[in-house]
Amino acid sequence: MAQRLASIADLERLAARITLRNASPRECLTLADSLIAVDDLRGVMAPLRGPLLASLRDRLDPQRDVIDRIAATVADNAPLSAREGGAIRSGVDAELDSLRAIARDSKSILMQIETRERGRTGIGSLKVRFNNVFGYYIEVSKSNLSRVPQDYIRKQTLVNAERFITPDLKELEEKITGAECSRRSRDRRRRFWQLPAQSGRWTRSAHSQASPDVTATFAPR
């Protein structure tokens, strides 16, 4: 019993931190591990017939729904701080997954746009590039300007080429440059997973767990 008790974190403290929205992703994982240990403790206490310990055992609540919610939502390798991003599992939030893909695959996305625009315009030398002044742009040599579609917006004139932007490319630029910030912000907003409403149950489990803890401490060895 003592071994099981030692693996249970301070549930009351975790409940307070999650209720106040101060808990880190790893503390949520710690909560899940502790609730699993509570379930194990119930099993260890199952043979006990003493009225006090039997009563305490029956009041222990492993809260499988909370364990399952955390397991389904929090990444196994969640960071210490939600500000770092990566706390939420893939597949939980479609918009978050999209932001991650944009941040991760921006070069691949630009290559796809370049291939698409070359096919659409018939300009084999068309390039999609980026610089810190103009952001993302499409570069077309002057010999191919007659093929430029009407939705291309001129941004810069060079000696041998023109640079353009399109509404779609501008929108993508905003997504790419803002994806990392948005991803982390959304990660933080999602990190509580409606758990604060459960905090009273954790506190009750903490109080129930404390009594066998004391009993085990003073029990004969």
Image: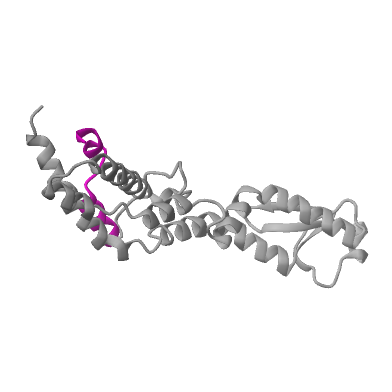
Residue in the picture at 27% in, 45% down: 42
Q: Is residue 68 above or below residue 36?
A: below
Q: Is residue 83 placed above or below 120 in the rendered structure?
A: above
Q: Residue at x 77, y 53 (%)?
A: 112
Q: Residue furthest top?
A: 221
Q: Looking at the image, which residue is at 63% across and 54% down?
A: 102
Residue 186 place in picture, x, y as percent? 47, 60
Q: Quadrant of the N terminus?
A: top left
How far from the left and from the top, in percent, is residue 163? 77, 60
Q: Is residue 161 visible?
A: no
Q: How many marks?
A: 0
| Drawn side of residue 26 relative to residue 166, left or right | left
13 magenta-colored: yes
Residue closest to the eye, 94 or 7: 7
Q: Is residue 194 above or below residue 82?
A: below
Q: Is residue 24 magenta?
A: no
Residue 29 visible within the image:
yes
Residue 140 placement, left or right of 88? right
Which segment is the magenta one? 1-19
If the image is split into quadrants, where does the C terminus sit? top left
Whole-percent x and y of residue 40?
31, 42
Residue 209 at x, y = what percent?
A: 19, 48
Depth order, front residue of 176/94: 94
Dominant secondary structure (helix, strand or loop) of the stretch shown in magenta: helix
For the residue pair 179 and 11, the one nearer the viewer reads as 11
Residue 181 is left or right of residue 39, and the answer is right
